[in-house]
Amino acid sequence: MAVPWDLLISTAGGVAATVVGVIAGGIVGRRGQNRQWLQGTQTAAYERFLQAFGAVEAELREAFLEERRPAPLIWGPFNAGVQSLSLVATREAADAAIELCEVVEDFTILFHGRQTTDLEKLRPIHSALEEAHLKFVNAARRSLDPSQEHFVRTLGGPPPWRGVVSFHAQGAIPDRGE
């Protein structure tokens, strides 16, 4: 009996195509799952960092304007948020977070050795905080989806400077000089 080579070749080709398809599908599926996991983890880390930054920024600003020392409990979540970023942030988002952390450090220096409510000392730091916050938000958004539009203003973060000035001008700060 003669071997039907055309049938044997087509069957072998079908089996090979199926095996290659299964292997390729597994690789593509795994990559998709890995990307989805990374994006979800990045989103959580970015959220955690932004929430902790918001708490730190608000406490530093209020402490500065109220002429008191900032609460020490704010640093734990902030440092944990930074550590989370170190695991999953893109280079651009990590660089922007570092810049934001440096401005926060500059803000804390205002508390070393004195308590002042001089708004002119706060103005450049507030401006740098706004800029660094916006830079981080845009970097985080791009890392999650490169098609995200570039923000020119952020939601949340440091309040507008006019709000800080208004708070200060309304006498919300106790006058400790009397």
Image (tube, rainbow, N blue to C red):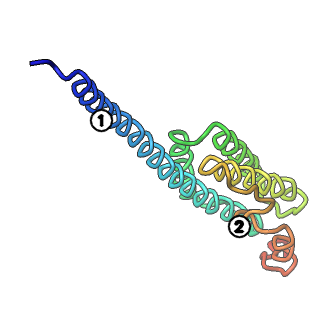
Residue furthest toward the left? Answer: 1
Residue furthest toward the top? Answer: 2
Pointers 1 and 2 in contact (C-beta within 8 Å): no
Taking the image as shown, residue 23 lies to the left or right of residue 102, namely left
Count of picture labels: 2
Residue at figure coordinates x 79%, y 62% from the top left: 153
Write down the residue under mark 1: 18
Residue at figure coordinates x 30%, y 35% from the top left: 18
Could you say which is closer to the camera, residue 89 or residue 71?
89
Amino acid at dot 1: Thr
Could you say which is closer to the camera, residue 107 or residue 37?
37
Residue 52 picture location, percent across and down: 58, 58
Could you say which is closer to the camera, residue 139 or residue 101?
139
Residue 4 picture location, percent across and down: 19, 23
The quadrant of the image that shows the C terminus is bottom right
The residue tagged with tag 2: helix, strand or loop? loop
Taking the image as shown, residue 36 lies to the left or right of residue 105, namely left
Mark nearer the N terminus (1 vs 2): 1
Residue at figure coordinates x 22%, y 25% from the top left: 8
Write down the residue under mark 2: 155
Amino acid at dot 2: Leu
| Snapshot quadrant of residue 14 | top left
Residue 62 picture location, percent across and down: 71, 67
The crowd level at tag 2 (other Cα within 10 Å; few <14, some 14-19, many 20+) is: few
The residue tagged with tag 1: helix, strand or loop? helix
Could you say which is closer to the camera, residue 135 or residue 56?
135
Residue at figure coordinates x 65%, y 53% from the top left: 141
